[in-house]
Amino acid sequence: MKKITAFLALCLGATGVQAQESNLQVKGTVVDTVAQYVYLQKFHNKMFTTIDSVKVTNGNFSFKTKVKTPELYGLSVNTANTPLYIFLEKGPISVKLSPAKYYGNSVVEGSASQDLFDTYRKTKDAEISKFITEHPASIVSAYVLYRNWSYRLTPEQITQNIALLDKSQQNSTYVKELQELVKVLNGLQIGKKAPDFVSKDPEGKPVRFSENLKGYTLVDFWASWCGPCRKENPNIVAAYKEFHDKGFNIIGISLDKKKENWIKGIKDDNLNWLQVSELIYWNSEIAKLYGVRAIPANYLVDSKGIIVARNLRGEELQTTLQSLLATKS
């Protein structure tokens, strides 16, 4: 334990700097693949966008792209798949890029932030406040709070954890987005009015949220590609069958990318209620409007659009509806 603590302390000293643009010094080898190109991808809003690519020559590749560091990026040999998550920093970094097992056999050397990130991922029970306190000046702390914890914490808890970060991280991309998220979530507390929106149903017809409120409505965020969503769908279907005639309705909001997958998911899971989607994945303006950082997620609103509960799942959804609609016949 002492050795690990000392190692992380060294990582902290190396990563406590403000992000700035610099030319990358990334060299590497590609193994376990015949891919001809390696793609450098920028991370934003849970998605990766390709910003550069280089040809693989005799199994080797090299990037000298000018990018903002330290910050999270992706390296990939196929942009259709999830890349290797890599924290890039100023200075020489070497990579052994192996796409097998979701890049699980890849090796990164020369990035203290990456070392700390890998250590965090191996510590499954890491508590965020403790981790930030131990590494307040690391970009990894800001990222983990943003990516792994923002959907688990209240606005107050997010703000408290931001305050634990060193001033060098207060202007980071991740903290700025967290601060915006806090503003959104503060306006979505129980008793507040749910934001109105317009989106399109599977036939392409515009649907306004506020014009489809009857009784109690579950605003349900899901996607066909989301395993936990598909697992929860039978519970929602059961609740709809039991309580629909008593005044329970649902508006499904999908974060799908492809219309055919969305339609198939609706059919396969028997989601026989109003469905809309922008078909733009995590770029969904509705998800942003509702502060949704992970799915499944939902809000239960009354006929006036006032939020009465959120993130009801399984038996809790049934119990809540039973309580609210007990007098309905």
Image: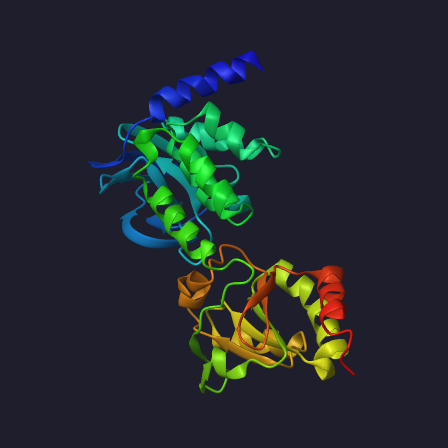
274 or 105, which lies in front?
A: 274
Identify the residue at horizontal 45%, vertical 64% (top origin): 281
Question: Residue 265: x and y, percent?
Answer: 60, 73
The x and y percentages for residue 263 are 56, 78
Quadrant of the image occupied by residue 231? bottom right
Residue found at x 56% / y 64% = 225
Q: Whole-percent x and y of residue 209?
A: 49, 78
Q: Nearer the viewer, residue 263 or 291?
A: 291
**Which residue is at a point 71% across and 70% down the rendered structure image?**
324
Q: Nearer the viewer, residue 97 or 147?
A: 147
- Return the x and y of residue 217 as percentages of the image width and height: 60, 74
**Residue 38 in view, yes or no:** no
Quarter holding the C terminus? bottom right
Picture layout, residue 96 above or below residue 304: above
Query: Does residue 174 sit above or below 277 in this rendering?
Result: above
Tell me if residue 166 can be seen: yes
